[in-house]
Every structure is written in C-alpha cells, then in structure tokens.
C-alpha cells in the first residue's frame, strides 16, 4: 500500500486545499478510493491525488532561519520615515 | 404505465436482487478489510439500496411496505443475492458477479418501451460502471497474488453458476414487447462469457452447469434469507408507524 494526499477545489476561485490522506495499492485504485473517501458528498469539483513520497518537505530548522523580522514589513516603518521627511505631524 | 403481471415480476426480481445485495454489502460497515475499502464498499451498498427504492417506486407508493412487508414466498430475489457472504472473499466475488450482471441487465433496459424504467436505467448505469470498476480492480489485484487466488477460488467456483439466476424471469415476452432491448437468454450468455473470460486469465475454469437455477425467482427462499430479512426489518419493527 502507498499513502496518497488529497487536495480538493470547490467551484469558483477557491484554491486547492488539503483534504486528507488515504492508502491504496496503486494509482488506478487510488482514483477509486479517493473518490469514495473524499468526494462522495460532492466536497469539491476538482481533486488532486499526490503520492506522499512525491511531496518535498522543507527542513524545519532551515525554514526557521528564513524567518526574519525584516521580512515581516507591514509598511509602518516606511510610513513613519515618509512623514518625518515631509515634515507632517504623525 | 400499468405493468403486466410479467413486467411486475421482472421489476420485483431486479429490485429484490438490489435490496438483498445492498443489505448484504452494508453488513461490512466498520469491519471492511481496510478503511478505504470499507468506505467504498458500503457506499456501493447505499447505491444498490437506492436502485432498489427506485425500482419499487415503479410499482407502488408505499416502498417500505413492498420492500419489507411481503411474505417469504412473495420475494423474487436470486439466491446468490441473498447469501450472507460473511467471509470477505465471498462478499467480493459476489459483488463482481452481481455487478457484471447489473451492467448487462441495466444496459438492456435503456430504450425500454417502459419509459420510466428506461430513464432509471440511464441514470443507474453511471453508478454501475463505477461499481464494476471498483470490484474488478480489487479482484484482479488479489487474483494476481497466490494467496489471494487460493482464498478466492472456492467462492468463484461456487458462486458463478448461481449467478445465472440473475437472468431468470417468468415472462418470456420481455424482449418481444420491448420492455428489454435484448432477450434474457442472450444477456445470460453475455454474462457467462464475460465472467468465464475474467477468471480464465487466472486458469480458473468455471462449470456454469447445464441450466440456470430458478428457485429464488419462483418464490422459494434460500437458507440465509431469514437472517437477512430479520436484520433489514429490525429498525422498522421497533416502531412500524414511525415517520422518517
């Protein structure tokens, strides 16, 4: 058996979202079981079925390294600097 | 349309087959061989019960009464449909034999002179295609495995000859009258050919016998029916007047 991850997309502009996972012996049966497990109550109009082994997982430590304060710019600092340079009261 | 006695018998037979197989499949809820198969198999059970409901509706406004309230000798189910099959090998083999038959029978009803029946057949065939794909995919994978083949072969040899009863009807004018677009005898031969071919690939040679069994169609119930009927009517008997 192989584990597959299921992503469903509803009608319209919604993005694909993770719905869950399931096991199947091969691709043909994966399609059958995915339909019954995650699509039998019309939960979505499109479905992606991905073997879990095809998913690249990012290393948690490296991911934490990429997260820095200055990447979280919400514009407040820039707004403050602009106000100062144009002489406006904040 | 008001059906003739023979046409009524046909629809009852089709409906009772669906009712029994649906109820039997549903027995596996929560105890299927693995979670995904459990969900798929019992979802098919629901479909089959739905088909039974639609068929009974062609004959009556009180579906529950017709489905559950008859005397034993008034049911027309084929004995293969009544078998409890509380061994997964048997349940899976019956599922496949049943759905090969369903595919053939429903196809022969598309274009029926009985308009409602023809419409129903068109709708049902979509689901049936999926049932057969599910059943034969799993069966083929298990038969390709030595242990799987060992477990499935006894069920195949015993059940396959029983499956001929799916094509037994007391009315031999169904094709002539346009109710079915293909005579039952031709459908039966198609079923024997398809079933035989499926298992020949694995060197399993079936003896289909010289004639089709017909006890179920003539009103005689098999040994398993009492238990099956007891279970399918259990909730109804708690409060027969309850409204759902």
Image (spheres, grey):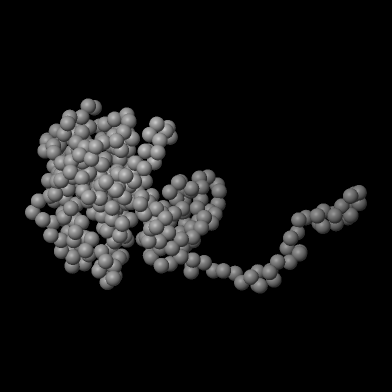
Q: Is residue B125 visible?
A: no
Please state the horizontal and vertical placement of residue B7, each as a whole percent of the image.
18, 34
Left or right: A48 as drawn, with respect to A29: right
Question: For the point 15% across and 46% down, which residue is it?
Answer: B215
Question: For the point 45% across and 50% down, which residue is it?
Answer: A39
| Quarter of the image that includes the N terminus of chain B | top left
Q: Residue furthest top?
A: B2
Please state the horizontal and vertical placement of residue B31, each as a whole percent of the image.
39, 57
Q: Is residue B114 visible?
A: yes
| Quarter of the image that includes the C terminus of chain B | top left
Left or right: B164 as drawn, with respect to B82: left
Please state the horizontal and vertical placement of residue A86, each as a whole percent of the image.
88, 52
Above or below — where is B116 with respect to A83? above
Q: Residue furthest front?
A: B238
Above or below — where is A63 with respect to B2? below
Left or right: B184 as drawn, with respect to A30: left
A90 and B4: which one is in front?
B4
Quarter where residue B135 is shown: bottom left
Q: Number of labelled discs?
A: 0
Quarter where residue B118 is shown: top left
B132 and B208: which one is in front?
B208
A32 and A64: which one is in front?
A32
Question: For the point 87% across and 52% down, which residue is it?
Answer: A83
Question: For the point 51% across and 47% down, which residue is it?
Answer: A10
Please state the horizontal and vertical placement of residue A32, each as a whole percent of the image.
38, 56
């Amino acid at each position: 058996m192989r584990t597959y991850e299921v992503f469903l997309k509803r009608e319209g502009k919604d993005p694909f979202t993770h719905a869950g996972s399931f096991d199947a012996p091969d691709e043909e049966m994966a399609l059958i079981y995915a339909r019954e497990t995650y699509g039998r109550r019309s939960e979505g109009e499109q479905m992606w079925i991905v073997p879990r082994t095809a998913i690249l997982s990012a290393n948690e430590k490296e991911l934490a390294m990429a997260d820095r304060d200055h990447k979280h710019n919400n514009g407040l600092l820039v707004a403050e600097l602009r106000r100062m340079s144009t002489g406006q009261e904040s | 349309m008001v059906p003739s006695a023979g046409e009524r018998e046909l629809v009852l037979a089709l409906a009772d087959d669906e009712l029994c197989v649906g109820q039997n499949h549903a027995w596996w809820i929560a105890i299927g061989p693995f979670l995904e198969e459990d969900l798929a198999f019992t979802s098919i059970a629901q479909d089959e019960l739905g088909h039974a409901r639609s068929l009974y509706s062609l004959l009556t406004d009180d579906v529950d009464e017709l489905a559950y309230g008859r005397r034993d000798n008034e049911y027309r189910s084929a004995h293969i449909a009544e078998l409890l099959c509380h061994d997964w090998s048997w349940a899976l083999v019956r599922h496949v034999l049943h759905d090969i038959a369903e595919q053939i029978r429903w196809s022969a009803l598309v274009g029926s002179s009985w308009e409602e029946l023809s419409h129903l057949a068109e709708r049902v065939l979509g689901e049936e295609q999926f049932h057969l794909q599910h059943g034969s995919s799993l069966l083929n994978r298990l038969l390709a495995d030595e242990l799987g083949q060992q477990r499935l072969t006894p069920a195949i040899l015993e059940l396959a000859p029983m499956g001929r009863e799916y094509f037994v009807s007391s009315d031999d004018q169904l094709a002539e009258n346009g109710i079915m677009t293909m005579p039952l005898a031709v459908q039966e031969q198609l079923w024997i050919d398809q079933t035989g071919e499926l298992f020949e690939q694995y060197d399993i040679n079936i003896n289909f016998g010289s004639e089709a069994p017909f006890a179920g169609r003539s009103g005689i119930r098999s040994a398993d029916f009492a238990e099956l009927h007891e279970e399918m009517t259990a909730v109804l008997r708690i409060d027969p007047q309850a409204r759902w």
